[in-house]
Amino acid sequence: MSSSTSKLWELLKNLDPSAQFYTSGKAPTVLPGLTVKGVGPIALPVSPSNAESLISRASQAPYGEGEQTIVDPSVRRVWQLEPGDFTLDNPAWGDLLADIVDRVKKEFALTVSVKASLYKLLIYEKGSFFTSHRDSEKEAGMFGTLVICLPSRHQGGS
C-alpha cells in the first residue's frame, strides 16, 4: 500500500457509522394503490396501454443546474407526474414507507427525526435516461434521496 493510501485508510477507518453515504435494500412487495387523476387505478406492472395513459398526463421532467431549472431531453429523458396528479391509496404503503425510513435511520446512525416526502412519480419508458448527476436539495434539511422502484419489467438502470 502506498503512503497516501495508508494515510487515507487511517482516516477512513476512524469514521463512525454516520459517515455512511448510501444504503440500499429490498422490501416485501406492497403495491401502493396508485390512482392517477384522469386515468384511474393503475395495475402493476404497468401495461403498455396504461403507460401511454400515464405519459399523456405527464410532463417532461426537468433537472436543476445551479438556480436554473432546465428541460433538455439530451440530459434527462423522463416523464413526471406531480404529487397532486396521483394518490397512493393502499394503507399498507404508509407502513412500508415508515419501515424503510426506520431502516435508513439505523443504517446512517441518525438520532434526529426523519421523514420521507413525496416529490414526484417518474415514468421511464424504453430509451429513457438521466445522465450522471447529483440530486439537489428539494427542501430544508434534506440529506438524501429515497428512490422506490415499483414492480416493472426493465433492463439497465445502472
Image (spheres, rainbow, N blue to C red):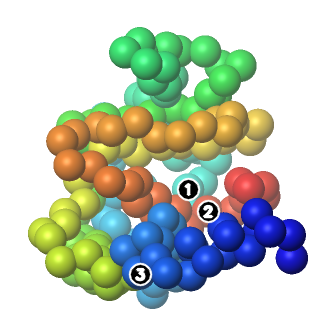
Mark-to-mark CA distance, 1 and 2: 7 Å
Q: Which residue reaches farthest front?
A: 3
Task: Note whether 102 is above or below 86 in the view shown.
Answer: below
> Of label 3 and label 2, which has the lower sequence position?
3
Numbered disc total: 3
Along the line of sight, the residue nearer the viewer: 111 or 16: 16
Q: Position of residue 36 (x, y in %)?
A: 32, 44
- Of badges 3 and 2, the one in the foreground is 3
Q: Which residue position is annotated with label 1? A: 46
Location of the C terminus (image quadrant): bottom right
Task: Note whether 4 is above or below 143 in the view shown.
Answer: below
Q: Which residue position is annotated with label 3? A: 17
Q: Which residue reaches farthest left?
A: 113
Q: Which residue position is annotated with label 2? A: 152
Q: Amino acid at mark 1?
A: Val
Q: Secondary structure at mark 1?
A: loop
